[in-house]
Image (cartoon, rainbow, N blue to C red):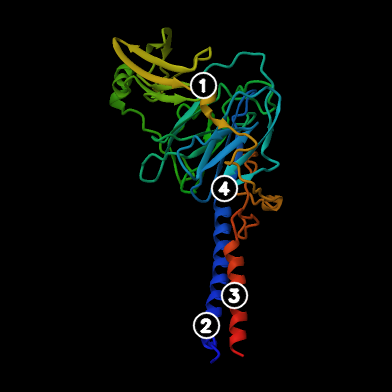
Amino acid sequence: MKDKKFPTIFGIILLLIILFLGVFLSTQKTSLNSKASVSCEPINTQITNLTDKSFDFSFTTSSPCSATLTINNILYQDVSLSLTTHYYKIFNLSPKTDYKFSLISGSTTYSRPEYSLTTATKPNSPPPSSNLAWGKIIDKSNKAVSGAIIYLTLPGSQALSAFSNKDGNWNISLASSFNEQKTDWFSPSSIVDEEIIVYSPDGQLTQVTNQSDRNDPVPDIIIGQDYLSVIPTPPSSFQSSLNSSQIETSLAKLSITSPKENETIYTLKPDIFGQGPASNTFQLDIDGNKENITVSPSNIWNYSPSQNLSPGSHLLTLNFQGEIISRNFVVAQTNDYLSFTATPSATLIPTQVVIPTIFASPTPIIQPTLVPTIRTAKPSTTSTLYESGNSLPTYLISILSILFFGVSFYYSH
């Protein structure tokens, strides 16, 4: 019987194809893992709005990513309006207590030494009267920018922040902020310069300086420009000769800027504000509790309830000279910030953890003297993370390569 021989040339070609595919697939897998690790790494992280029972945490990512914060086995969802700027509001904490938290960004859990804090001491004095910093974020085309993170630094205060809503509006309650020592409420003593830093969803950083007496409102902040928008010019000399109340009544009708209709508010003592005729008084009513409010000379009014509002739906009504304006809004309960409670067997939390070398040499993006607690980290171009995938195809190809090589060698001799 004639011996059957396996074609030598065919065997060599097949062997080369298999080896090429093995090397190619292994390279592709490493490359994809590296990109995913870098893009979802939290950068520009900051703890802000720290009080005796709450704090906010925010950061940015270089690519759109979903992220979750976990503290005391409770997961908090991102409340920002963007997948590149991330913002978390943590409530229901205990005064003067140490806390540590971690992040799940993309598919990786990040646990870093700076993800820790101590809450403030519970103040003995009541909160100060309403004091609001608010404004609008716009781009160079005068369009509203939503999802931007705004950091406000005032001498003597804890770092403050907010994020812009779908209309580009933002607001920070200075009345509920704490001093730098975390021992009492913050009370600004005089007019000072303040730093405002904005991270927009497209990755731009905008930094401006403002005076604290121009917080109500802050002139529009234009993304990419290091100066505030031009303040509207005063009335002409002809208008100035008229009765000032008549002029301002015609220029600014009574309106509510915040809250929006059916908006959910994440604080029990919200700052409520809007515009109106200068130096005129109107009646404000929340669920039957009435207050007389006087509009400031700059056509701005604001109000904060002296007592906490109950969680649930509320009706806000303004009455000025027979004109009625109403607004419905919702005060969120504490558990509205939570998605669910994590358990040791939860499959959502991945097993992989970032090793400490990824943040051993942080590269600051902004000067620490402007916002001291902002911590930045330069994404590594070579990832040290390990993917928890199955590498069986690579091993299988290697085994098949050896097998085909042996068969080819045997039949060729």
Given the image, on which type of amino acid does mark 4 rest? Answer: Ser
Residue 301: in sight, yes or no?
Answer: no
Residue 339: in sight, yes or no?
Answer: yes
Residue named by callout 4: 107
Q: Nearer the viewer, mark 2 or mark 1?
A: 2
Q: Nearer the viewer, mark 3 or mark 1?
A: 3
Given the image, on which type of amino acid does mark 3 rest? Answer: Ser
Residue named by callout 3: 401
Callout 3–callout 4 Cβ contact below 8 Å: no
Given the image, on which type of amino acid does mark 2 rest? Answer: Ile
3D distance between C-alphas at marks 2 and 4: 40 Å
Q: Earlier in the sequence, mark 3 or mark 4?
A: 4
Residue 398 has which mark?
none
Residue named by callout 2: 13
Of residues 311 and 401, the one drawn nearer to the viewer in this rendering: 401
Q: Furthest residue to the front?
A: 1
